[in-house]
Image (tube, helix red, strand yellow):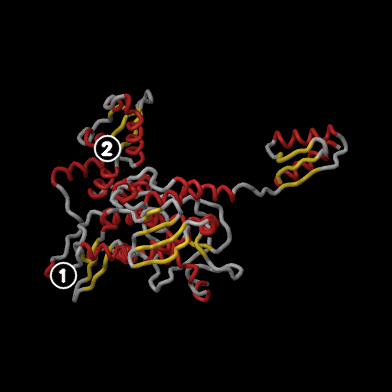
Amino acid sequence: MVFVEWLFSCEIACYIYLLRQLSTASAKMPQVMVVARNFMDMVAALPAAKLDMLYDSAFICEAVLRSFPPLAKKYVLQMLYVLAPVPAAAIEEWVLDEYASKHKVAIDRLVQLRVFVEVRDRRKEVSYKMNIKFQDNMQKYLVSGGSLPRQPIPSSITGRLPTLTELENYALEQWECFLLQLINSSQVEKGTTQNSVLIPRDNEAPKLSENGFQFLLMETNAQLWYIMREYISSAEERGVDPTELISFLLELSFHTLGDAYSLNSLTDVQRIAIRDLAELGLVKLQQGRKDSWFIPTKLATNLSSSLSDASASKEGIVVVETNFRLYAYSASRLHCEILRLFSRVEYQLPNLIVGAITKESLYGAFDNGITAEQIVAFLQQNAHPRVADKIPIVPENVTDQIRLWENDRNRVEMVLSHVYEEFPSKDMFEQCCDHARDNGFLLWEDAKKMRLIVRVEFHQEMREFLRRQR
């Protein structure tokens, strides 16, 4: 991977870490699927001591509770005022046998996030007890409620704030600006790329890695979680405690959408983070005569929601016809560039993108690591409401052809190998074949002409075997 710095004047740590993963020179890399993980996956990965530190905040406890599946939430509420450990066998009796799989998922998630702590008695029977910090904070929160670490600034100080529509447009523009930078990284002048986005290799134009193209086809909230995961993962490299960063980001999701909050109420770490988040569109920064403040956008308030809930309200834009014509009802330049990754865009009207899925455009996508299944999934997930209820959403002849064109490229697999011939006897030839076959390295054999081919990594072993036979 080529290490990168952010192209703009503000060096943003999350961009740097993300572009390390998504941007590379044109050398071919192994295909690695980008996995979208939400906030609670990151929280569960923390060491037990740091996870317990997070539960000092009632809002972190509530965010964790929100993330649980329904059955896990029920278990938490049932055990909220139970101080003694409850046997695992007793908890299993709370559900019918047909829901045993959901019960296991719920218990596993509760244990992963240390809301339930395993206790074993002398007979090694398992019981579960609630995390003391989590239990105390949730009891207080349910009885007396809670207040955020910071209160909104009165409108008498801020004056007119952006409307929710203006705020959503701002977040969308910032997010698209970031994604367009990834797509257009190959258009950066060579002189500026040496120490910025990419380092060209052998005078070839830089381009996104396979991970980068997969990232661009993900849902917006999945993309956001992926960036936040990388941003938090790189925190220690910047001398920042990941626990403090996670705590701040989860608390941010409880702020009121559209309200203004003073920057003076933030710690140094939080002040640096809020400026990074502003570049991604999670918050909007404003400067008054005396005070400065930030305004959370919808991207920030969605941080603690589930992936399925956050993605459910997305409206699609794409219509695909049986003649491979593609229509996207959007004025977004980002949508146009994403469609250009796997289709031939013919023209763009103010609110309509017209293109076609061709063999050549798909071969270009396959060369860049995009798979047929990813393209089909993208077309289905982004289908226009007029066709979203149809079965199939994308015409079968189109999806079948996309997969066939991908298979055409995979019909021949190149394997480095060695050929052996001119054996002194039939017996030695058969012994060599058996030896290669037993070790799983035999690729081909011709008994009549006494020839065999083995994988290149087995060549030295085969030479030693032949030497021993002599």
Q: Which residue is mark 1?
A: 160
Q: Position of residue 160 (x, y in %)?
A: 16, 70
Q: Secondary structure at mark 1?
A: loop
Q: Quadrant of residue 137?
A: top left
| On-image quarter of the C terminus | top right
Q: Residue at x 33, y 57 (%)?
A: 245
Q: Secondary structure at mark 2?
A: helix
Mark 1 touches mark 2? (CB < 8 Å) = no
Q: Nearer the viewer, residue 91 or 373?
A: 373
Q: In the rendered image, is residue 464 in sight?
A: yes
Q: Nearer the viewer, residue 131 or 370?
A: 370
**Vertical side of 139 occupied by 167: above or below:** below
**Vertical side of 166 occupied by 418: above or below:** above
Crowding near the residue tagged with mark 1, few <14, some 14–19, many ≥20 C-alpha atoms within 10 Å? few
Q: Nearer the viewer, residue 397 or 383?
A: 397
Q: Which residue is mark 2?
A: 70
What amino acid type is highlighted by mark number 2?
Pro
Q: CA distance from mark 1 to mark 2?
A: 41 Å
Q: Position of residue 219 (x, y in %)?
A: 37, 53
Q: Position of residue 229 (x, y in %)?
A: 39, 54
* Residue 311 in the figure: left or right of residue 394: left
Q: Quadrant of residue 142?
A: top left
Q: Residue at x 16, y 65 (%)?
A: 153
Q: In the rendered image, is residue 276 in sight?
A: no
| The residue positioned farthest toward the front in the image shown | 323
Identify the mark nearer the N-term, 1 or 2: 2
Q: Residue at x 85, y 39 (%)?
A: 423
What amino acid type is highlighted by mark number 1?
Arg
| The residue positioned farthest toward the left in the image shown | 156
* Residue 454 in the figure: left or right of residue 19: right
Crowding near the residue tagged with mark 2, few <14, some 14–19, many ≥20 C-alpha atoms within 10 Å? few
